[in-house]
DNA sequence: CGTGTCGTTGAGTCCCATCAAACGAGGTGG
DNA sequence: CCACCTCGTTTGATGGGACTCAACGACACG
C-alpha cells in the first residue's frame, strides 16, 4: 500500500484531469503544481517541499498538473486504501485538516503577491518564502546575521510561472537585487542571501 | 455555544491578528477576506458565500481581515467548544476537511486569474465565478439560454481588490463587456449575463 | 442645498511583456 | 580536440496595457 517513487528533474508527475490513483507525501525535492490555460499561459499554484502532501483524498481526478523541479522522491499511497485508513483514523484526518488549512493560508498569502506586488517585490517574496521554509525544515540553519545559502532547483521560467511574470523580467530583477547587495547569484542555481532582514523589508515584511 | 450575528453592509467582522474567539458559517450575504500591505495596497483572498465556513479551528489569531459586503448573517460558534466538538466527531472533521480542500482548489484556481489573465479576462472570470456559485446555491435558476440575473454586493473597489486591478480599470472593462453584449449593467449593483457561454469563452473556459 | 459615496470618463505615464540577439555551459559525435 | 547543438540565461529595444491623476455626474442623506 505504501511505496516510494523517484522522479528525475523536470519530469511530469501527473496531469490535471488524470484519474487520481495515489496520494503522496514529498520526501525530497520540490514539486510544482501548476495550471495551464489553453493558449499556453501557465501559472504555478503551489510549491511542495519535503513533508508536504500531494493529492486529494475523495477526489477521482487530479486537479492540477504536477511536475518535479529537481529530483523528487515521493512516498506514495494508493488512494482507495488511504481513504479507508483516513475514515478509521480520526487523528490522521485532523492532522491532514491542519496541513490543508496551512496550505490554504499560504495560498491566500500568495494571492497578495500575485495581485498587488511589483516585479521586484515578487522576486524578493519568492526568495524570502523559500528561504523561510527551507530553514524551517532544517533547524540550526541560517541564524540571523549570517548569509543564508540556498540551492533551489527552479529555472527562471519556473520562477516566472510562480510569480506571474516573464522569465526575462525575473532575470532582470534578480540582477537588480544582486546589484543592490541583497542577493549573491552563485554558480549554477545556488544563491546566497547575505541580509535576509533587508530582503524582508523589500516585500514589506517587518524586519 | 451557537448563536447568530448580523453585520450591516460594509462593516468589518474581524481584523488580521485579532484573537480568534469564534468560528462561523455564512448564512446569508457575502464575506470578503482580504490582506492589506502596510502601504495600503489590499488584495481580497477569498469570497465567502452562504454555506461557506469562516475561521480556523486550532489557530489562536485571525489570519485575514474579514468584512461584510452587503448585509451578512453568520452562524457563530465559540472556538474552544467547537474544537472539542470537532475532536469528538470524526464525521464533522472529515466534512470540514472536504470543504477546506475545495477552498484550496478554488484559491489555487484564482491564482491563475491573478497571475496570468488580462484585465478583461479577470473581470469576466469574477462574473462567471460568482454566477456559477450563485446558481449552484439556488437550484432551478439560470438554465441555459436564459439571461442570468445577479445581484452581488461588491463595489468597483471591492471587485478591483479581488482582481488585482484598480477600480478605474474594473469600471472600464465592465463598460467594454457591456458594449460587447456580454453583460447588462442593471440599476444599482444588479446586473444580468445574457450569454453565459459566450462569457465563459472570454476566460478560456470551454463553452 | 451642502456633503459624502460610488461610478464613469479622459489624458498622460510607466512598468512589464514582447521580440530579438548573443552568451555560457554541457553534451555529443566527428 | 573542436565543431555543433541544446538549454538556460542575460541583455537590449520597443510597444502596449494598466496605473495614476484628475474631473465630473448620479444618488442618498442630513
Image (spheres, coloured by chain):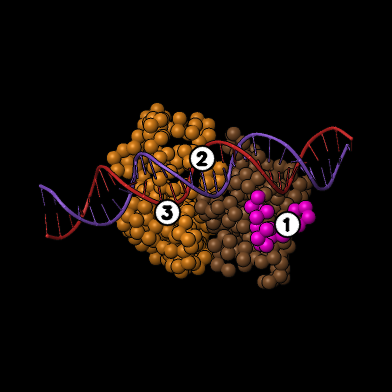
Chain colours: A orange, B brown, C red, D purple
Quarter occupied by the N terminus of chain A: bottom left
Residue sitting at 52 percent across and 43 percent down?
A: A113
Q: Which residue is mark 3?
A: A32
Same chain? Circles 2 and 3: yes
Q: Position of residue A122 (x, y in %)?
A: 48, 41
Q: Determine the chain carrying the residue at label 2.
A: A
From the image, state whether disc 1 or disc 2 is nearer to you: 1
Between label 2 and label 3, give the one nearer the viewer.
2
CA separation in Å, label 2 and label 3: 23 Å
Dot 1: what SS? Answer: strand
Which structural element holds mark 3? strand
Q: Compare marks 2 and 3 and give the one earlier in the sequence.
A: 3
Circle 1 sits on which residue?
B185
Relative image position of residue A85 (x, y in whole percent): 48, 63
At x 38%, y 47%, the residue is: A156
Q: Is residue B180 magenta?
A: yes
Check residue A83 for magenta coloring. no
Which residue position holds label 2?
Answer: A118
Q: A179 above or below D8?
A: above
* Both labels 3 and 1 in a single chain: no
> Which chain is indicated by disc 1?
B
Q: Is residue A55 above or below residue A163?
A: below
State whether residue B4 appears in this view. no
Q: Which mark is residue A57?
A: none
Q: Which span is picked out in magenta?
A: B172-189
- Nearest the camera: B186 or B14? B186
Relative placement, left or right, of A53 versus A29 is right
Amino acid at each position: 500500500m505504501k511505496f516510494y517513487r523517484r522522479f528525475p528533474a523536470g519530469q511530469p508527475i501527473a496531469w490535471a484531469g488524470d484519474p487520481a490513483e495515489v496520494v503522496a507525501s514529498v520526501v525530497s525535492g520540490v514539486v510544482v503544481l501548476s495550471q495551464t490555460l489553453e493558449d499556453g499561459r501557465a501559472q504555478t499554484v503551489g510549491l511542495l517541499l519535503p513533508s508536504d502532501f500531494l493529492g486529494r483524498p475523495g477526489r477521482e481526478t487530479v486537479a492540477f498538473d504536477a511536475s518535479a523541479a529537481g529530483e523528487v522522491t515521493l512516498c506514495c499511497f494508493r488512494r482507495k486504501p488511504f481513504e479507508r485508513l483516513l475514515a478509521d483514523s480520526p487523528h490522521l484526518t485532523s492532522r491532514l485538516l491542519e496541513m490543508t488549512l496551512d496550505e490554504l493560508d499560504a495560498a491566500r498569502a500568495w494571492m497578495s503577491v500575485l495581485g498587488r506586488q511589483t516585479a521586484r517585490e515578487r522576486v524578493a517574496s519568492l526568495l524570502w518564502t523559500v528561504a523561510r521554509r527551507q530553514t524551517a525544515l532544517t533547524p540550526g540553519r541560517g541564524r540571523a546575521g549570517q548569509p543564508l545559502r540556498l540551492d533551489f532547483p527552479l529555472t527562471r521560467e519556473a520562477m516566472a510561472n510562480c510569480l506571474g511574470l516573464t522569465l526575462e523580467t525575473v532575470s532582470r530583477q534578480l540582477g537588480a537585487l544582486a546589484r543592490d547587495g541583497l542577493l549573491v547569484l552563485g554558480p549554477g542555481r545556488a544563491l546566497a542571501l547575505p541580509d535576509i532582514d533587508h530582503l524582508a523589508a523589500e516585500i514589506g515584511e517587518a524586519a
